[in-house]
């Protein structure tokens, strides 16, 4: 175990832990934002540069500071290391510059984007973005490509975080999409316009931090902050069957994997659970899913509404079957 200090808070972590994961042990404002890193995906990180931090002391043995800002998602901690994140003006200024760079080509689609309300880039822009863009050149645009029955690709919104590529490469048997071309012509696409179709292809929707990959079965149905997220499960032979249901009344509008406090999917789910099971009788509903208070989704007070209904209805009526009701 090694001891590191991040923004004045000391934490003890295992060796070979990244600065980002060490900060996540503490939580709060100490945690740098991450647009490309995903703890469950090997090789992710180091591309978006939003997690830059300042190492003011390399270690107890060598107290010299690192000369430049480092990516916290790929830099390992050392015993006695001192790290500055939100307390460093240099880091804050660099993060603003990175956000400005990410927004150079990203369109202002928030009013019509299904990712609005749960978009990492939207949150990052609100915290660090400028009110007016200094970019005067023409933004890059791409033609829309149909990559499957259930997934819509809007390459114009993509920030090339590579998460979807790593997901398809590591949890499916056959990956048919990746990054094509180079430089400012780079884009996510399929070779000779293949269709993405495998049992776990829908997970690329969950890992996308922006609205580049969206669920066709949910598109334009409802703003996410009007939905009521519920934890639910079912017996599934392909995956764990543990999901989050996004409901409107008694109707299930979409099904997603359950995400942790850092926006990462806890367990990847299959397409059968995601796209084909849209009836309440298909699921055992456990109760309302807690969403952090800083999120706009929590502002419709769906948890309080569920508790009120729970007090006025029979358990069997809510949970769908006798065994679950007894539990």
Image (spheres, grey):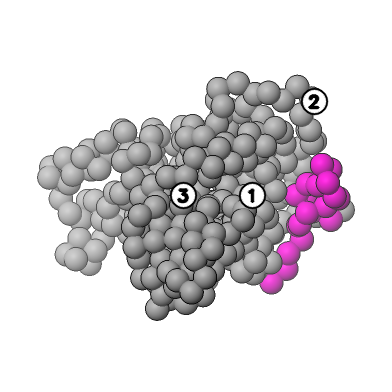
Q: Which residue is mark 1?
A: 48
Which numbered disc, 3 or 1, marks the residue closer to the eye? 3
Residue 112 lies, with reference to residue 269, above or below; the image says above
How packed mark 1 is, by other alpha carbons closer than 10 Å (few <14, some 14-19, many 20 or more), is: many
How packed mark 2 is, by other alpha carbons closer than 10 Å (few <14, some 14-19, many 20 or more), is: few
Tell me whether circle 1 and circle 2 mark residues in contact (CB < 8 Å). no
Dividing the picture into quadrants, the one containing residue 297 is: top left
Residues 201 and 140: in front is 140
Q: The magenta stretch spans which residues?
A: 173-191
Between discs 3 and 1, the one toward the N terminus? 1
Which numbered disc, 3 or 2, marks the residue closer to the eye? 3
What element does badge 2 sit on? Answer: loop
Alpha carbons under labels 3 and 2: distance apart: 33 Å
Q: Which residue is mark 2?
A: 138
Residue 129 lies, with reference to residue 287, above or below; the image says above
Residues 294 and 301: in front is 294
Q: Which residue is mark 3?
A: 85
Between discs 1 and 2, the one toward the N terminus? 1
Left of 220 or right of it: where is 137? Answer: right
Dividing the picture into quadrants, the one containing residue 260 is: bottom left
Magenta-colored stretch includes residue 176: yes
Residues 137 and 211: in front is 137
Residue at image coords 39%, 61%:
5
How packed mark 3 is, by other alpha carbons closer than 10 Å (few <14, some 14-19, many 20 or more), is: many
The image shows residue 105 at horizontal and vertical percentages of 71, 33
Residue at image coords 62%, 53%:
68
The image shows residue 278 at horizontal and vertical percentages of 46, 50
């Amino acid at each position: 175990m090694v001891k590191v200090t991040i923004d004045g808070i000391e934490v003890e972590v295992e060796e070979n832990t990244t600065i980002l994961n060490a900060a996540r042990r503490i939580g709060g404002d100490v945690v740098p934002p991450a647009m490309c890193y995903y703890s469950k995906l090997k090789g992710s990180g180091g591309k978006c540069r939003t997690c830059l931090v300042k190492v003011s002391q390399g270690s107890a043995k060598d107290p010299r500071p690192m000369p430049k800002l480092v990516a916290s998602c790929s830099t390992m901690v050392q015993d006695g290391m001192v790290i500055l994140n939100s307390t460093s003006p240099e880091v804050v200024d660099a993060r603003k510059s990175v956000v400005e760079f990410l927004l150079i080509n990203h369109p202002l689609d928030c009013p019509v984007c299904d990712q609005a309300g749960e978009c990492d880039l939207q949150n990052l822009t609100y915290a660090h973005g400028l009110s007016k863009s200094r970019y005067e050149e023409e933004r890059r645009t791409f033609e829309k490509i149909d990559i499957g029955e259930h997934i819509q690709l809007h390459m114009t919104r993509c920030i090339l975080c590579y998460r979807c590529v790593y997901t398809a490469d590591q949890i499916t048997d056959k990956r048919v999409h990746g990054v094509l071309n180079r430089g400012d012509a780079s884009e996510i696409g399929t070779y000779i316009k293949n269709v993405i179709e495998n049992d776990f292809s829908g997970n690329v929707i969950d890992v996308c931090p922006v609205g580049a990959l969206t669920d066709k079965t949910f598109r334009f149905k409802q703003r996410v902050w009007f939905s009521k997220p519920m934890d639910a499960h079912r017996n599934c032979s392909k995956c764990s069957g543990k999901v989050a249901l996004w409901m409107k009344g008694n109707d299930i509008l979409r099904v997603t994997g359950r995400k942790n406090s850092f926006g990462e999917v806890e367990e990847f789910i299959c397409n059968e659970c995601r796209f084909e099971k849209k009836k309440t009788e298909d699921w055992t509903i456990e109760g309302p899913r807690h969403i952090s208070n800083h999120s706009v989704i929590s502002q419709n007070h769906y948890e309080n509404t569920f508790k009120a209904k729970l007090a006025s209805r029979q358990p069997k009526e809510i949970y769908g079957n006798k065994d679950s009701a007894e539990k």
